[in-house]
C-alpha cells in the first residue's frame, strides 16, 4: 500500500510520528557535526533516512514491551524511549551514559523502556527477542517482544533458528527486518538469495512494507503487532528502506548500487507534506518543532559534556 | 523470591541421608523450580522420556521443562533473552561438544552482557553441560572443555565432584545473578554421599580439602578428584587433595595455603593440556606461591590430541587412578 | 508419484538397487546379532528401514562425486561404495577400519569413493557438501556433491546458511534430507515448523518423494541430480522415510508417534514384489542373493576380527 | 604444485627491501595465489573495495576471492569442504570475535578432521583473524582470543609480529596440510621491515630471540613484542625478549634455554588471563625449567574483564610499553 492510500491517523499521533523521526534525524545530524572534534570515541552507524521504520513500529509499543536491536542503535533506541541525554552521554563515554560508558554506540541498554541490551554481533539479538517473548508467555504477562534487525542478519543461521522456534512455541514476538538492501557495502543480491517475506512466510504470517513511508509502516506494524498481541504468536514484517549514510561513520553513502533520492525517499519530507496538506502542520510549526528538538539536543550534549568519565579503578566491576 | 533465605552451608558433609549424585542434582533442580516459579529448564531433549540421563525424570513442574530443536545457538539467545526478562533459565546440553555451536552466544553475549551494561541487566542463567567418556564415540562426542569456559571473563564455572557439592553448588548457581557453566561428569552420577534434604547453597569460589596430606598438593577437578582419592588410598600416599569445585572464581588462597604446607603441586584436570585449567593453576602457584615450591609443578591432563574411538586408544588417552598414582610416586621419589 | 506409477529401470539396475538395500539391511542385522557380545565398542545408529534413500540416491553418483553425511553412517557409506570390510573393521576399532579405528561408527571416511569424512555433530556436514561443490566449480571439474542429512539437521542454522550460500553462488550440490520425522525421540512436529520442500523451495528447486520406495527415490534423485550436474546449481530433495530402530542402539523403536508397518513400509519388500511381478527375481534368486551377502558379511567380520588394534603409542599422530 | 621448492629460510632478516606488515601479508597472499591455483580466499567482505584493511587490494587473482553472506559457521564448513576436495582456502575474518559464530566448525570439525581420519584427508586451511584494539568498540568487537584456539589440539596458531615473519609464516601456513589460525594485529600493519621479494617459508614452531639480555626472559606475542622492545629500549633494560611466533606448536626449547640463562620469566600476552597463553608458558617453565627459576614467573595480560568502551577505561584495560617497563623494573628490583 502506498502512502497516499493510507488514511492519516489522528493529529496527535501524526505529530508524534513526525517529532520522533525528526529527533532521530537531528540527533544524528548533531553527531555528524560533533564527530570530527573527537568528543565521541566510538564507531557510529547512523540511521538517517531510515527513521520511518523504528518510529512507525515503536509507536505501537509500550515501555514494557521489549526490543532487541543491533549495531545501528540510535533510531530504534530513541524511538523506544531512550533519553537523548543518556544516549549522548554514552557516545561521550560518560558514567551517565545509558551503559555507563562501558557499552559505546553499539551497546545500549534501558531496562525501563524495554531495552535489555543491543548487540553488535549481527544476528544474535533475534534469538534474544524470542526468549523475551517466551518469558512473557511463561509468566502469563501481556507484553510482547520485538526482534529488530537488518537484512544482513537474515543471512545468519540464528535468524532461521529463531523463526522456527518462535513458530513452534508460538511466542508473541515481532520479527522486524529493516531491509536497507545493504550489508556493509554488499547489495542484498550478493548476500541473500530469497525474498524475505516469502521465505519467512513458510514459518509465520509475513509481509513487506515501504519503509520510507512512516504511515505505511505505522499501519502495517500496527496490524502485525495487534496480531502478535492478540493471537500470541510470531509475525514477520519487512520494512524496505534506504541507507543514506555509509555503513559506519558520518559520510554520505556513494555506492553505485545504492542510489538515494534524498527528496523522494525522505520519510520526514513525506510525512510533512501529508501533514501540510491536511493543514495540521505549517512551515512555521515544523520550524518550531525543529528548534525545540535542537534545544533538546543542546541539552543532551551539555549534559554529556558535564558528566564525569568512569574512573580507572572501576574497570573490573560487574564481572 | 527471597533466595537469601536459603541457608549458606559451609559444613563439609552434613545430613544423614545418602543419595546419588544424580539424585542430588535432580533434587536441586526440582527444589529450585518449586521454590521459585521463575526457574525453568530448556534444552534439546530436556523434556523427553530419558530426562537428561535420569536427572530430570521426577520433576514436580514438568510443565516448566521446554524441549527445543537442534538449534543450540539460538536457544542460548532465547535463554539469555528470557533471563533478562525476569526468568531464571536452566539451559541443558547433553554433551558439552554441542555447546560449541552456541559459543557465539556464550562468549559474545552471555559472558559480556552484565559487564557491558554494568549490572543494569542481570544474567541469572545456568548452563548445564554433561560430559563423559568416549566408549568409542570419538572426537566429536567426548569433549570436556572446562578450560575454554574458564578462559572467558564473565562466566563462572563449576565442576562439583560429590553429591553434596553438586546440590549445594547448583542451588548457588541458580540463585546467582551471573551466568554459570555447570559441568557434570556422567560417570559421577551413580556415586553416593550424604546430602541434606533441605535447600542449601555452597559459597561460590570456595574450594575444599578432600584429603589431608603433607608431601604434595594435588588440585583435581570433577571425576579426577575421585580418581586421585582412589590413587592416594590404594597407595597410602601422604598427599593433600584439593577440589576447587569452582574453576572460576578460583579459591587461590586455599591452593596457595596447601602448597605452602606441602611444597609441591600436581594438577589433575581431564581436559586438553595447552592453555588449560591445569596450566592456570600451575601458573598461579609459580607466580604467587613460588617461594613455597620445592620442586617443579606438574600437570596430568589429556594428551595433546583429540579423542580417538578404538578402545585401546581410549585407554591410552584417558588418565586413570593408576596413572595418577604412578605420577605421584614419581614426584615423591 | 507412487511406486506403481514408476516404470522399472532396466533389470541390471533393479537388481543392483535390491542388492545394495539388502547389503545395508543384512549388514546391520549382523550388527544386531554381534553387538551384545561387545565386540563393537562404539554407539551405532542403524539405518534399517530407510535403505531406499541412500541407495536410490547413490545409484546416480560416481566415485568422484562427494557426499557428506552424519551420525547415521552405515546406509549412505555402503551405498556410496565403502567396503564392508573397512566399515566392519572400524566398528571393531581396528587399524584396518576406514578411519583406522580412530573414528568409530559415526566418523567414517573413504576418499576413493568421495567420502571425505562424516560428522556426528548434527548439521555441519551440510556446509561441507556445499564447500566441496564450490571446489568442483572453482576447479572446473564435473563432479557434484551431496549434503546428506536428517530432518533434525534442518533445525540448525547452518542448514539455512548453506541453502542460501549454495543458491547465491550456484554450486552443484544436492541437498538430500532423509526425513524420518524424528530427531532422536522427538517427532518432527516438535522440532520443525515448516514443510521442508516448501521452505527450501524459496531458495532452489525443491521436491519431496516417498523414501520408502526405492524406485520413487531413484527416479526423483535421478531427476534432481541431473539438474545439479547439467545446470550446475543446487537442488533440494526430501525423502520421507520411517525409522524402524531406536535412534541409537540395536532395539526396535516403539515410540507411539512412530508407528511402523514393517510389511508395508519395507523398501526391500516393495522392490522384491515389483521384481517378482516382472519376473526378474524369484524367491530363490532372492534367497541366493541374501546368502551371497551373508558370505560377504562373514568375510567382513572375519577380516575385522583378524585385524590388529591400533597400538597405544600411536595415540598422538596426525595432530 | 611443488611447494617444497619454496625456500625454507631461517635467516632473521634478510633482503634489502623495506615494506610494511600490511604489504608483506598482501604480497604473501598474492604470491601464494599466483604460485598455486588451488589457493583461494573466502570471507565476509573479503572481496569488497576495502580489501580486508588494504591487505588484499592489489591481488593478481581477484577472481579467486569469494565474498560471503554473514554466515560464519557455514562458511567455515564450506572452506573445510573445499579444502578436503583439493583446494587450499584462506578464510578471512575481519574481527576475531566473529569466529565465535564458527566455533563449532573450528573446534569440532576443522581441528579434529585430520586426526579423526588419520591423515587420509588433509586440511590445508588457513584462517586469518584480524584483531585490534577498542576505540570505543566495546566488548563484542575487541577480542584477541589466541588462547582459545591454542587450547584446541589440531589447530596451529600463528601470531607474527614483524613484516618478515608475517610473510614467511603465512606462506608456511598455506603450504601446510594442517589447519592454521593466523592472527594479525591491525596495529602492526603500518610497521616496516626488511622483507625478501621472493617466496620463503619460515619453519613452523620456531621462536625467535628478538633482543638479547641476561636478567629476565620476556616471552611476548604479536604487538606485545613491539611494546616490550620499546619498553626495554626506552629504559635500557638487560632483558631478553623472545617471540614464539607460533603459539602452537610452541618452541619450548628456546623458551627454556632463555630462562636457563636469565633465571626469570615474564609473559606478555594481550588476551584474557585465566587459562591463557601466558598461563601456559608460565606452567611450562615452572614444570620443565623449574631448576632455572630464581624468582616467581609473571604474567602481564588483559585484566579479568571484558573490554569497556569509554576511553579512560580502555586505557586502563590495555597493557602498554610503559606498563611493561614498570613491571620489568619491579621484577628486576
Ligand atoms: C557475526 C558478525 N559478522 C560480521 C559482522 C560485521 N558487520 C557489522 S554490521 C554488518 C552488516 C549488517 O547488515 P544489516 O544486518 O543489513 O544491518 P545494517 O547495517 O544494514 O543496518 C556486518 C557484516 C558482525 N558485526 N557480526
Ligand atoms: C549440534 C548437535 N546437537 C545435538 C546432537 C545430538 N543428536 C544426535 S543425532 C540427533 C537427532 C538427529 O536427527 P536427524 O538429523 O533427523 O537424523 P536421524 O537421527 O533421524 O537420522 C541429535 C539431536 C548432535 N549430535 N549435534
Ligand atoms: Mg542492511
Ligand atoms: Mg530424523
Image (cartoon, coloured by chain):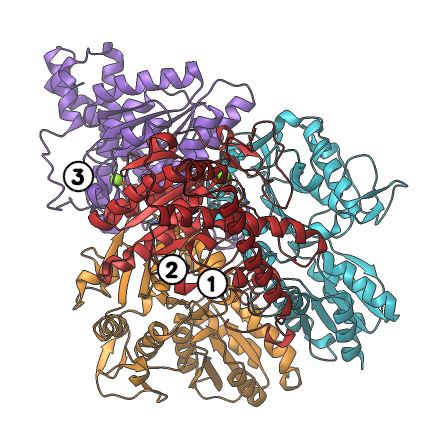
Chain colours: A red, B orange, C purple, D cyan
Q: Residue A156, image x and y in percent?
A: 44, 42
Identify the disc placed on residue B233: none
| Residue of label 2 | B80
Is B286 located above or below residue C209 in the figure?
A: below
Residue A194, placed above or below residue B86: above
Pinpoint the chain carrying mark 3: C
Q: Position of residue A149 (x, y in %)?
A: 44, 45
Q: C301 or A92: nearer the eye? A: A92
Give the quadrant of residue B283: bottom right
Between D60 and C52, the one lying in front of the other is: D60
Mark identifier at residue C244: 3
Q: State yes or no: discs 2 and 1 in contact (Cβ < 8 Å).
A: yes
User: Of the residues under marks 2 and 1, which one precedes in the sequence?
Assistant: 2
Chain of the residue on which disc 2 is drawn: B
* The CB of the residue at mark 2 lies under 8 Å from ligand 1: no
Front position among marks 2 and 3:
2
Mark 2 to mark 3 CA distance (whole Å): 38 Å
Identify the element where label 1 is drawn.
helix
Q: Is residue D203 visible?
A: yes
Q: Are marks 1 and 3 on the same chain?
A: no
Depth check, mark 1 against mark 3: the one in front is 1
Q: CA distance from mark 2 to mark 1?
A: 9 Å
Q: Position of residue B195 (x, y in %)?
A: 26, 82
**Taking the image as drawn, is residue C110 in sight?**
no
The residue identified by callout 1 is: B113
Per the model, the C-alpha gap separating discs 1 and 3 is: 45 Å
Describe the element under mark 2 as helix, strand or loop.
helix
Q: Secondary structure at mark 3?
A: loop
**At x 28% / y 38%, what residue is drawn?**
A203
Crowding near the residue tagged with mark 3, few <14, some 14–19, many ≥20 C-alpha atoms within 10 Å: many
Q: Are marks 2 and 3 in contact (CB under 8 Å)?
A: no
Task: Spot the residue most to the right.
Answer: D16
Amino acid at each position: 500500500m502506498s502512502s497516499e492510500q493510507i488514511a492519516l491517523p489522528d493529529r496527535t499521533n501524526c505529530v508524534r510520528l513526525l517529532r520522533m523521526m525528526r529527533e532521530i534525524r537531528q540527533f544524528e545530524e548533531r553527531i555528524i557535526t560533533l564527530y570530527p572534534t573527537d568528543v565521541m570515541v566510538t564507531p557510529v552507524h547512523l540511521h538517517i533516512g531510515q527513521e520511518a521504520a523504528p518510529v512507525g513500529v515503536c509507536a505501537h509499543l509500550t515501555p514494557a514491551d521489549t526490543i532487541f536491536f543491533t549495531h545501528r542503535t540510535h533510531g530504534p533506541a530513541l524511538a523506544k524511549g531512550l533519553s537523548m541525554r543518556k544516549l549522548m552521554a554514552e557516545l561521550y563515554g560518560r558514567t551517565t551514559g545509558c551503559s555507563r560508558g562501558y557499552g559505546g554506540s553499539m551497546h545500549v541498554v534501558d531496562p525501563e523502556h524495554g531495552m535489555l541490551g543491543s548487540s553488535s554481533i549481527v544476528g544474535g539479538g533475534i534469538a534474544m527477542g524470542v526468549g523475551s517473548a517466551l518469558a512473557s508467555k511463561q509468566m502469563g504477562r501481556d507484553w510482547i517482544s520485538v526482534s529488530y534487525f537488518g537484512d544482513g542478519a537474515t543471512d545468519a543461521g540464528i535468524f532461521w533458528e529463531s523463526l522456527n522456534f518462535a513458530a513452534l512455541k508460538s511466542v508473541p514476538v515481532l520479527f522486524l527486518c529493516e531491509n536497507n538492501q545493504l550489508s556493509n557495502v554488499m547489495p542484498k543480491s550478493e548476500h541473500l538469495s530469497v525474498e524475505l517475506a516469502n521465505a519467512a512466510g513458510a514459518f509465520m504470517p509475513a509481509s513487506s512494507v515501504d519503509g520510507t513511508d512512516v504511515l505505511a509502516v505505522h499501519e502495517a506494524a500496527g496490524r502485525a503487532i495487534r496480531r502478535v498481541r492478540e493471537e500470541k504468536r510470531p509475525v514477520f514484517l519487512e520494512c524496505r528502506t534506504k541507507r543514506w549514510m555509509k555503513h559506519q561513520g558520518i559520510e554520505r553513502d556513494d555506492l553505485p548500487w545504492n542510489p538515494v533520492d534524498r527528496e523522494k525517499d525522505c520519510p520526514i519530507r513525506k510525512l510533512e507534506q501529508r501533514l501540510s496538506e491536511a493543514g495540521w502542520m505549517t512551515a512555521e510549526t515544523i520550524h518550531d518543532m525543529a528548534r525545540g528538538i535542537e534545544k533538546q539536543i543542546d541539552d543532551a550534549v551539555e549534559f554529556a559534556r558535564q558528566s564525569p568519565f568512569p574512573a580507572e579503578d572501576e574497570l573490573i566491576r560487574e564481572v | 523470591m527471597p533466595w537469601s533465605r536459603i541457608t549458606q552451608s559451609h559444613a563439609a558433609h552434613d545430613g544423614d541421608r545418602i543419595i546419588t549424585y544424580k539424585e542430588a542434582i535432580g533434587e536441586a533442580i526440582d527444589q529450585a523450580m518449586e521454590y521459585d516459579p521463575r526457574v525453568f529448564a530448556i534444552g534439546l531433549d530436556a523434556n523427553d522420556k530419558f530426562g537428561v540421563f535420569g536427572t530430570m525424570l521426577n520433576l514436580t513442574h514438568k510443565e516448566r521443562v521446554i524441549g527445543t530443536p537442534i538449534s543450540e545457538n539460538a536457544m542460548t539467545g532465547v535463554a539469555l533473552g528470557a533471563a533478562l526478562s525476569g526468568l531464571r533459565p536452566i539451559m541443558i546440553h547433553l554433551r558439552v561438544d554441542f555447546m560449541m555451536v552456541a559459543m557465539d552466544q556464550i562468549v559474545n553475549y552471555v559472558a559480556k552482557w552484565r559487564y557491558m551494561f554494568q549490572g543494569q541487566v542481570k544474567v541469572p542463567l545456568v548452563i548445564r553441560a554433561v560430559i563423559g567418556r568416549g566408549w568409542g564415540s570419538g572426537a566429536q562426542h567426548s569433549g570436556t572443555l572446562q578450560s575454554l569456559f574458564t578462559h572467558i571473563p564473565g562466566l563462572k564455572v563449576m565442576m562439583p565432584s560429590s553429591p553434596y557439592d553438586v546440590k549445594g553448588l547448583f542451588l548457588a548457581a541458580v540463585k546467582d545473578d551471573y551466568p554459570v557453566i555447570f559441568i557434570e561428569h556422567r560417570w559421577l552420577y551413580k556415586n553416593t554421599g550424604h546430602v541434606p534434604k533441605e535447600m542449601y547453597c555452597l559459597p561460590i569460589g570456595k574450594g575444599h580439602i578432600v584429603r589431608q596430606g603433607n608431601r604434595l598438593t594435588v588440585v583435581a577437578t570433577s571425576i579426577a578428584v575421585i580418581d586421585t582419592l582412589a590413587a592416594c588410598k590404594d597407595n597410602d600416599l601422604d598427599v593433600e587433595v584439593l577440589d576447587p569445585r569452582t574453576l572460576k572464581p578460583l579459591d587461590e588462597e586455599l591452593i596457595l595455603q596447601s602448597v605452602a604446607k606441602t611444597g609441591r603441586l600436581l594438577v589433575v584436570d581431564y581436559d586438553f593440556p595447552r592453555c588449560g585449567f591445569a596450566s592456570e593453576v600451575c601458573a598461579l602457584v609459580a607466580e604467587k606461591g613460588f617461594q613455597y615450591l620445592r620442586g617443579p609443578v606438574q600437570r596430568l591432563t589429556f594428551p595433546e590430541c583429540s579423542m580417538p574411538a578404538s578402545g585401546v586408544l581410549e585407554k591410552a588417552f584417558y588418565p586413570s587412578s593408576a596413572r595418577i598414582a604412578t605420577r605421584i610416586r614419581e614426584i615423591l621419589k
